Structures are given as structure tokens and as C-alpha cells.
Amino acid sequence: MNLQKEKKYIDIFVNLTGDLLCDELVESMKNYHHHKEINTHYHSLFVAYSVMKLCERLQVINEREIVRAALLHDFYLYEWYTEKHEEYHIWYHPKESVKNIEAHFGKLTPMQKNMVLSHMFPTYVELPKSLGAWMLTFCDKRCAIEDYFKLSTRFEPVYERINYTVKNND
């Protein structure tokens, strides 16, 4: 990705999510593996950034609400490769993410809650009920495929710039 071309989008993204990105628990997502070598923080930013760009293309009016839910969609805060639960991770982590988000940041809107709970559709029974939920589901699948095939490395310069901008208020 060309950073010069992405500057406008990076600024919008930081404006929408900067307060969340400064949060210690969001920062701790860097400690949890998600897809092979990709950590949950990187994947979540990649997904949320993709959702934001899709919101821009579709001229979605509630972009902030959607992008913030997209950023936190995998806020489950455990190492799923080693820490096992009664349910498989694929079904457990959306509920755990909602629980963690609401405990740490406060109540989600009904749309945001559905976005997080349904992002694993069709492997999870929660049906996406809004354009935001469908966008998150689509972008999450696309980014996961890119993660597995190591294609998401193209997002790395944008990821680094977002983190630099948030830390330096640039």
C-alpha cells in the first residue's frame, strides 16, 4: 500500500478509533496470536481499516459506530491456540468479545453487538442484521484469508503509520 495515497484514510481511521487504540487492553491484543503469526491487534486493525474504506465507498452515514465495532470484533483477550473453553473458539470468541467490550468500554449499540456476534457467520448461528454487520463479516473473511496466505503483509506500512500517529498524536 502506498502510504501517500493512504494518508487521508489513515487520518480518518485515527480520528474514528484513536481513543480505542490508546487503550492498554486494546494494545494487549498484540500479545495474542490470531491467524498463524498474525496477532489479534494487527488483524483487527486490518479488518476495521478495510471496513472503514468500504464505508467510504458506500457512503455509510454511521461509519464511526461501524468502524469501532469492527476494531473490537476480536476483543476476546486470550491465547486461543492453547487456552481451551467448553465451546470451540469459533463459537466462543464472539460472545467473549462482547462481554469484554461491554465490561471495559460500556454498552454496545444493538447494531454493534450484532456485528461482533455475527462476524463468524455462517459458521456461527447469529445472522448479520445490518449493512455494518455484513461488511464486517465480509471484510473479516477476506482479511483472514490474506492473513493465512501472508498477503496481509501489504497492510504493514499502514498499520505502522496508524500506530505511530496514535502514539505521537501526529
Image: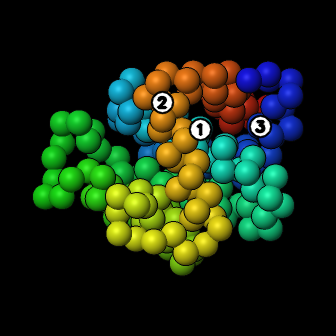
Q: CA distance from mark 1 to mark 2?
A: 10 Å
| Chosen colour scheme | rainbow
Instruction: Provide the residue designation for mark 2.
Output: 147
Q: CA distance from mark 2 to mark 3?
A: 20 Å
Instruction: Identify the residue shown where x is 73% and y is 51%.
Output: 54
Quarter of the image that includes the N terminus: top right
> Which badge, 1 or 3, is on the more N-terminal residue?
3
> How many C-alpha atoms fall within 10 Å of the one at disc 1: few (<14), some, or many (≥20)?
many
Depth check: give the residue in front, 18 or 117: 117
> How many C-alpha atoms fall within 10 Å of the one at disc 2: few (<14), some, or many (≥20)?
many
Instruction: Provide the residue designation for mark 3.
Output: 10
Q: Is residue 125 left or right of residue 158?
A: left
Residues tagged 1 and 2 counted as in contact (Cβ below 8 A): yes
Give the structural element (helix, strand or loop) at label 2. helix
Residue pushed farthest front?
A: 122
One can see residue 40 in this view: yes
Comparing labels 1 and 3, the label whose residue is closer to the camera: 1
> Which badge, 1 or 2, is on the more N-terminal residue?
1
Q: Which mark is residue 46?
A: 1
Q: Amino acid at mark 1?
A: Phe
- The location of residue 159, given as percent across then percent down, is 63, 29
Q: Amino acid at mark 2?
A: Asp
Give the structural element (helix, strand or loop) at label 3. helix
Quarter of the rendering containing residue 132: bottom right
